Amino acid sequence: MGSKLLLKDLSLTLQDHQKIAIIGRNGVGKSTLLGLLDGSDDEYIGEVNLKKGAVVLSTRQEHAEVGDMTVIEYILSELPEYSRLKQIIESYPELQAPSDQDLSEYSDAIERFAILDYYRAEDKILQELEKYQLDSTVAASPLKNLSGGQKRFVELVKIAESHVDLALIDEPTNHMDYVAKTEFISWLKACPYAVVLVSHDRDVLANVDTIIEIKDQKADVFNGNYDAYLKQNSHSTLQGIDQYEIQLKTLQNVKKQLAEANRKKASSSKTPNPFIPMIRRFEKEIARLEATAVKPSFWIDQDSIDEQQGRVVEKYDKYKARNIRVKTEQASKHHQALLQVHKLSLGYTKELFSDISFILNTGDRLELRGRNGAGKSTLVRAILGHIKSSQLGCQSFAGEIEVFNALRVGYYEQEIDISLLKMTLAEAIEQVYHEASQPINLEKIMSLANQYLFEPERDLKLTLEKLSGGQKARFQLIKMLCNEPNMLILDEPTNHLDLPSIEELEKSLINYSGAILYVSHDNYFRDKIGGEIVQI
């Protein structure tokens, strides 16, 4: 595909009503596979065959060309057959002398419009939008005025209200709160047609019936949900490691035989030399073995590894795939107060919330929980503003925020600061380190890029705006940790990260001795990190 081979020898059959999730590291071809299925990507060799008459609809990533349409207009225009049928129905009464064919077409359109329940389409769309906290005012607004998260919700409503055979959805639950995610998962389970989605949200993966993992230019199919995938992946990966070891030992043995044959050839005086055919045979076998003994990307989740015996764990540690290395500097384990919020009420023209109180000491974990718009981000921004002695960005109606002298905070935010987007990755790393008054040089930048799975020679020259969602998330981790913080503030840190990266982050946070204040709608992440819950 294109200048880079992403997938080869892929065979896949989709059944009616099947719910499939595609997982894999950043850049392996997950979104490309969706493009093959909806026809937007034609750079492939092979065949993609759809059932005759099958209707496929995918979530749109870019909205520039439809930005002036209102939300309701856009969704209606994307519904299969809606625009065509509506045009026939509305234009028929204006015909001067309609023919029998016109009448037949008009009657068929009315019947089809009713079958698809399009007479109630607008009301149903408004109801679905409300589930994602998009009210009638938003529905009547131009699409270009919406945030990235809101546009994602619009795409999901479009899919939910469409009558299709196959829906293709890319990262559906990013930016969702826990109520909206519950609504989406309920829809997914009840959905009457096939769905293929790209997601690393483990709450979503727990509710699909097939998982396709793309790695090493192959697509491995695992029947069942996330728990079934973990068991099957653990078993197949351990088998794969054994097979890889056998290949390496075989290669080593043939190389020894080749060396011995070369030694005997050198000491032989016979003509023709009887060892030459043997040497050629060994060289041919070595070339074959080296071509096939390519190290696969081995990854097993930590819980499954913990169930294995010591020898197996040692073998896995020897061959496992590279992962990001999240190095959280160990804060002082001396128990000390870092941050206190006392009876705080914040808002803008009116209060968003009131009477919020908590204190964070070294080692504490605290989750801010609430719906989108409840004020979680407002509270986080107010805390950060108080730490930096800058304006809060909102109005304080009552209460106070107290920051203690020992506090050094690291902040993981979902959106990269706009001032950094035009910088190259190297320039942005240098900038955030300078802002944190931390030493930085080219060697350190190269080391950080390698540590977070960037390809230094290529990626350090890219501007941040050209990075993928997963790459941007890894940059945010670099930024968060650059000042050796003793308190972390995390805003949906698992969005865009793949499963191995999420697990590495969780492991690092569990071992982190500083305080953590976090917002997450990932139930697996919340169970791992735990802590007190403050409901906003």
Image (cartoon, rainbow, N blue to C red):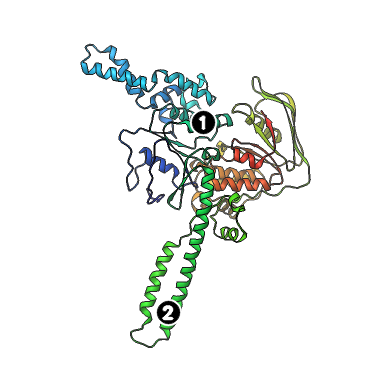
Hey, which quadrant is residue 122 in on the image?
A: top left
Query: Which residue is at 43% across, 51% downward?
Result: 218
450 versus 43 height, above or below: below
Residue 320: give its label. Answer: none
Closer to the observer: label 1 or label 2?
1
Q: Quadrant of the C terminus?
A: top right
Q: Amino acid at mark 2?
A: Ala
Secondary element type, mark 1: helix
Does the image show residue 89? yes
Q: Amino acid at mark 1?
A: Ser
Q: Residue furthest bottom?
A: 269
Q: How many circles with numbers are drawn on the protein?
A: 2
Secondary element type, mark 2: helix
Query: Which residue is at 64% across, 50% downward?
Result: 327
Q: Position of residue 363 (x, y in %)?
A: 73, 43
Q: Position of residue 48 (x, y in %)?
A: 33, 42
User: Which badge, 1 or 2, comes first in the chain's sequence?
Assistant: 1
68 versus 443 height, above or below: above
417 versus 396 height, above or below: below
Front-most of residues 367 and 448: 367
| Side of 269 where 518 appears, left or right | right
Query: Which residue is at 49% across, 61% downward?
Result: 244
Q: Residues within 10 Å of mark 2 (few under 14, many from 20)?
A: many
| Side of 66 where 456 appears, left or right | right
| Side of 505 where 399 appears, left or right | right
Q: Which residue is under mark 1?
A: 186
Q: Position of residue 129 (x, y in %)?
A: 50, 24
Q: CA–CA distance between discs 1 and 2?
A: 67 Å
Q: Position of residue 263 (x, y in %)?
A: 45, 81
Front-most of residues 446 and 233: 233
Residue 261: give its label. Answer: 2
